[in-house]
Image: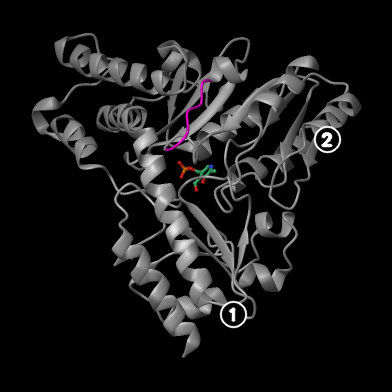
Amino acid sequence: MIYLDHLASTPLDPLVLEAMLPWMRPEAAGNPHAAHPAGWRAADAIEQARGEVAALVGAQPGEVVFTSGATEANALALLGGVPAGGGGVVSAVEHASVLGCLPELRRRGHPVTVLPVDGAGRVDPAALDDALTDMRHSSIVSVMAANNEVGTVQPLAELAAVAARHGALMHSDAVQALGTRMLDMAALGLHGLSLSGHKLYGPMGVGALIVRPPFRPVPASAGGGQQRGLRGGTLPTPLCVGLGAACRLARERREEDARHIGGLRDRLWQRLRDRLPGIRRNGATDGLAGCLNVTIPGIDAADRLLDLPDLAVATGSACHSGVGEPSHVLLAVGLSAADAHASLRFGLGRGSTAAEVDEAADRLAALLAG
Ligand SMILES: Cc1ncc(COP(=O)(O)O)c(C=O)c1O
C-alpha cells in the first residue's frame, strides 16, 4: 500500500506508541482524578502531556482542554463560544465540523456570516473587516490555519488583528498546520485553537481546544466538573500521553518534516505534470507542505481510483458524506462540480518516500493513459 492520505489521518509514530503503551497495561490502572497514588501517577502523566500540547502552540498548560478530537474542540469553540447576543464569522472553506455548527447557531438566534475565499482559497482580511462592521455584535471569528483539501494557509495574524480591532474573539482550527508550521497563539493573537491527535502522528480519539483568556466557552455537557468544568469526563491517560508525545515530536521535527514533505510534494507535482497533460493544481502554491490537490479534467476520480486499490489518496467528492457530493472547498475556490469530481488530493507525510511518490505518479499516469 502506498499511503498518501496523511491529511485524512497520519500513522501513529512508533515513539508515540512507545510512550502510550505503559499506560495501557493493567498495572497502570488508576483514574487520573482519583485521590490516591495510582491516580496521582496518571494525573502527573496527563499534566506533563498538557505541558507538551501547550508548548506546541505557545500557550499555558492550564489553557489546554483535552477533547475527543478536533470535531469536538471546534463544536465547543463555536457552539459554546459565541457570546450571548453575539454572532459568528467563519470562512467558506472550513472543515465540516465548523460549518456543521452554523445551523444550530442560527437556530439559537445568532447571526452568522460565511466569508468567501479567493481562487487560492484565501480569506481577505478586508472582507472580515466588513463583516464585523456589519455585524455590530460581540462575535467569535473562526478561520482555519491551513485548509485540509487544498492546503491554503490563511493570513491568521492579519485576520486576528482585524478581529481584535472589532473586539471579537479569534479561534482557529489548526489541525492541519501544526505538523509542519510554527503557530504561536500569543504572537498571532488567537484566543482559541483546535488540534487533533491523528493528524499529528498521535492517536485517534483525542484532541484539544486551547482557550486563552478572555475566551471561556460554555461547556457542552453537564456534570463531571473535570478540566475546570469545561469538559467533564474521566481523562483517557494513554490518549492524553500519546497526544503529548506527538506534540513534542511535532515541535522537534516540524522544520525537518516540512523540508522533507515539501520536497516530495514538489517532486510529485513535477512528475504528474510531466506525465498528465492538462493536469491543474488547486489552492495556493505556497500552501501546506504535505498537500497537493490536482484536477485531471474529464476523469471521475473516485471511480478511477477503484482501479488502484493499493494507492490511498483522497478524491474531490466529499468522502465524509459518503454520497459523492462535490467538495465545498473546491466549489468555493471556483471549480465546477465536474472538475471537483475530477480532483485528487495527495497527502504526504513524515514517512513518505521519493520511491512511493514516483510509483504513485507512474501508476496513476499509466492507468489514465490506458
Ligand atoms: C481541518 C480539520 N478540522 C477538523 C477535523 C476533525 O478532526 P477529528 O478527526 O479529530 O475530529 C479534521 C479531520 O479531518 C480536519 O482536517
Q: Nearer the viewer, residue 203 or 117?
A: 117
- The residue that mark 2 highlights is 127
Q: Secondary structure at mark 1?
A: loop
Type of amino acid at the residue the image marks with label 2: Ala
143 displayed left or right of 347: right
Q: Position of residue 119 (x, y in %)?
A: 74, 53
Say whether residue 105 is visible: yes
In which image quadrant can residue 301 be found? bottom right
Q: Nearer the viewer, residue 49 or 36?
A: 49
Q: Residues within 10 Å of mark 1 (few under 14, many from 20)?
A: some
Q: Nearer the viewer, residue 142 or 153?
A: 153
Q: Secondary structure at mark 2?
A: helix
Q: Position of residue 46 (x, y in %)?
A: 29, 20
- Sequence-wise, the earlier of marks 1 and 2 is 2
Q: Which quadrant of the figure contains the N terminus?
A: bottom left
Q: Residue furthest right?
A: 134
Give the residue drawn at x 59%, y 53%: 150
Span of residues in magenta? 180-184
Mark 2 within 8 Å of ligand 1, using the beta carbon: no
Vertical arrangement, residue 69 with respect to residue 287, above or below:
above
Type of amino acid at the residue the image marks with label 1: Ile
Q: How is the image coloured?
A: one colour
Q: Does the stretch in magenta take in 181?
A: yes
In the picture, the disc for residue 299 is 1
Give the residue drawn at x 69%, y 50%: 120
